[in-house]
Image (spheres, rainbow, N blue to C red):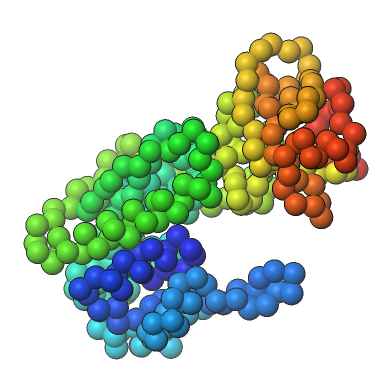
């Protein structure tokens, strides 16, 4: 069971393993792009390539989903970024349980966006945890766990593929050890749990009263989606690359303090954010040096909420 690109390495690893993938469950095709054409998930494309049976439930408790799922008689259900809650009837279906590949070092960052929140919060390491699923949100007993460094310039978009590859390898290893009877599950310490809730588009709006290092991390963690953005008058600026710098300023947070050939320096709640890559409506991402050739930007401009 899986849906986005993050789930593909898990499926590919299973297909290369000694076990048989009897069926694949993924979310229904979704409208995408300007034409809003129905588009299959990355996991569905792999299923079609391999000629494996596919189920795309609209409702998880619908008989038209549960009956064929039960008929597959799965020994184990592997779940990576499926995006739906599994009810007790599904959790209890496979004799060996449902094994989830989660993109964090549980119990930290339970929830839908563990990769993004680890970067937003300035973590220097994260990892993959495999666990036996229960009815809670990523609360089941842990099986295997492996750490991965977060590089200083990682975005959620660059970190996710490395985690996904690790997840595929750890999933196959987890199943092998479960079959061999050599794996003992470990209960999570709920007192150490933190949450990583689903991000929304409005979470990308920059709050300039935050400290510069936190804003730089937020820019990285929100890339590629939903993207960090602010407004200059009525124009929306998406900020894709930025670093923090110290230095005291009396300017109001969100004020452009200085502009040079490569960057735009903006006052924050503490320190300054050095903007290096930017994008406006109907344009592509570009370095600030290119942006400045077509935009008049000067010190004193106030960034923030859109002018109405």
Number of numbered labels in the structure image: 0
Please give the name of the residue rendered at 32% of the width and 37% of the height, measured from the top-left corner. Answer: 191
Looking at the picture, does residue 160 appear above or below residue 123? below
Please give the name of the residue rendered at 73% of the width and 30% of the height, measured from the top-left corner. Answer: 262
Please give the name of the residue rendered at 76% of the width and 12% of the height, measured from the top-left corner. Answer: 250
**Side of 56 relative to 80 (left or right):** right
**Side of 227 relative to 68 (left or right):** right
Looking at the picture, does residue 172 appear above or below residue 259? below
Coordinates of residue 135 in the picture (x, y in percent): 34, 61
Report the quarter where the N terminus lies: bottom left
**Side of 67 relative to 283 (left or right):** left
Image quarter of residue 167 = bottom left
Coordinates of residue 260 in the picture (x, y in percent): 78, 24
Residue placed most toward the observer, 14 or 188: 14
Camera sees residue 57: no
Report the quarter where the C terminus lies: top right
Camera sees residue 20: yes
Coordinates of residue 251 in the picture (x, y in percent): 78, 16
Image quarter of residue 130 = bottom left
Image quarter of residue 105 = top left
Please give the name of the residue rendered at 68% of the width and 47% of the height, measured from the top-left corner. Answer: 202
Residue placed most toward the observer, 161 or 289: 289
Coordinates of residue 228 in the picture (x, y in percent): 67, 42
């Amino acid at each position: 069971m899986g849906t986005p690109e993050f789930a593909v390495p898990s499926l590919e690893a299973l297909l290369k393993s000694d076990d048989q993938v009897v069926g694949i469950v993924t979310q229904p095709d979704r409208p995408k792009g300007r034409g809003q054409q129905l588009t299959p998930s990355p996991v569905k494309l792999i299923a079609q390539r391999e000629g494996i049976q596919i189920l795309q439930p609209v409702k998880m408790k619908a008989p038209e989903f549960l009956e064929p799922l039960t008929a597959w008689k799965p020994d184990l259900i592997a779940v990576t970024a499926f995006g739906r809650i599994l009810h007790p009837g599904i959790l209890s279906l496979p004799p060996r349980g449902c094994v989830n590949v989660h993109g964090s070092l549980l119990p930290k960052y339970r929830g839908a966006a563990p990769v993004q929140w680890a970067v937003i919060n300035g973590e220097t390491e994260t990892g993959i945890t495999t666990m036996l699923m229960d009815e809670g949100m990523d609360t089941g007993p842990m099986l295997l766990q492996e750490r991965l460094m977060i590089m200083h310039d990682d975005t959620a978009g660059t970190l996710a593929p490395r985690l996904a590859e690790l997840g595929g390898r750890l999933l196959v290893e987890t199943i092998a050890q479960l079959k061999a009877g050599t794996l003992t599950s470990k209960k999570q310490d709920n007192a150490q749990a933190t949450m990583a809730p689903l991000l929304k588009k409005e979470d990308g709006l920059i709050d300039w009263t935050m400290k510069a290092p936190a804003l730089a991390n937020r820019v990285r963690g929100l890339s590629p989606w939903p993207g960090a953005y602010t407004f200059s008058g009525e124009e929306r600026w998406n900020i894709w690359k930025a670093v923090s710098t110290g230095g005291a300023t009396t300017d109001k947070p969100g004020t452009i303090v200085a502009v040079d050939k490569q960057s735009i320096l903006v006052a924050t709640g503490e320190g300054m954010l050095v903007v290096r890559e930017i994008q406006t409506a109907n344009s592509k991402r570009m370095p600030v040096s290119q942006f400045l050739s077509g935009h008049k930007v000067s010190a004193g401009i106030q960034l923030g909420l859109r002018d109405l």
